[in-house]
Image: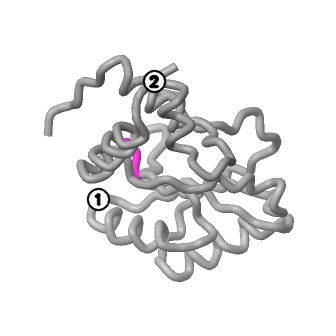
Amino acid sequence: MNRPEFTETEERILALAGGNLSRGPQPFKDIADEVGCSEAQVLELLNRLKDDTIIRRFGATLRHQKAGYGHNAMVAWIIGEADVDRVGEMMAARPEISHCYRRRTYPEWPYDLYTMIHGKNPGDCAELAARLSEETGLADYSILNSIKELKKSSMRYFI
């Protein structure tokens, strides 16, 4: 599939849809009113991008720290080419893991899978990493505990 070209109106719609939606009963009509188009045009664009898998979904963002999950860690794993997809899918299915990425390795940093783990209490992330290690047989991992959140926001593509 080719990368889509967006009109100026579509870019404005996407900029607003990518931010905080209004709390009113018709958030997509509110976008349409601000952009100067119809609600049907807004919905058609968003549905088309969803059908083309450019947009995956719309959903609420839970601020995990405010919800009681104040402890998190990026866990870097050494898996290897043969098992990275299988293990990555298994880890990505865990509810305690919000992000799961495969990345390039380097001689000085051989980790190839990264998981972001969230916990309510100190030690929760390390305990889950140990359980995941046992379940997968992966002994080589490094826990990078978060110390302080400096920024948390969604990516803004059209400003």
Asked whether, in this view, residue 104 is left or right of residue 5, the answer is: right
Q: Nearest the camera: 154 or 24? A: 24
Give above or below for 3 relative to 71: above
Quarter of the image with the N terminus is top left
Asked whether, in this view, residue 41 is left or right of residue 39, the answer is: left
Residue drawn 49% across the image and 53% down it: 58
- Disc 1 secondary structure class: loop
Q: Nearest the camera: 157 or 7? A: 7
Residue 104, magenta (yes or no) = yes
Residue furthest out toward the bottom: 135
Residue furthest out toward the left: 1
Q: What residue did someone put label 1 on?
A: 81
Residue drawn 35% across the image and 63% down it: 84
Asked whether, in this view, residue 153 is left or right of residue 105, the answer is: right
Q: Position of residue 21 (x, y in %)?
A: 61, 42
**How many marks overall?**
2
Disc 1 and disc 2 in contact, CB within 8 angstroms: no
Residue 4, magenta (yes or no) = no
Main secondary structure along the magenta-highlighted residues: loop
Q: What residue did someone put label 2 on?
A: 36
Residue 105 makes an appearance in the image: no
* Span shown in magenta: 102-106
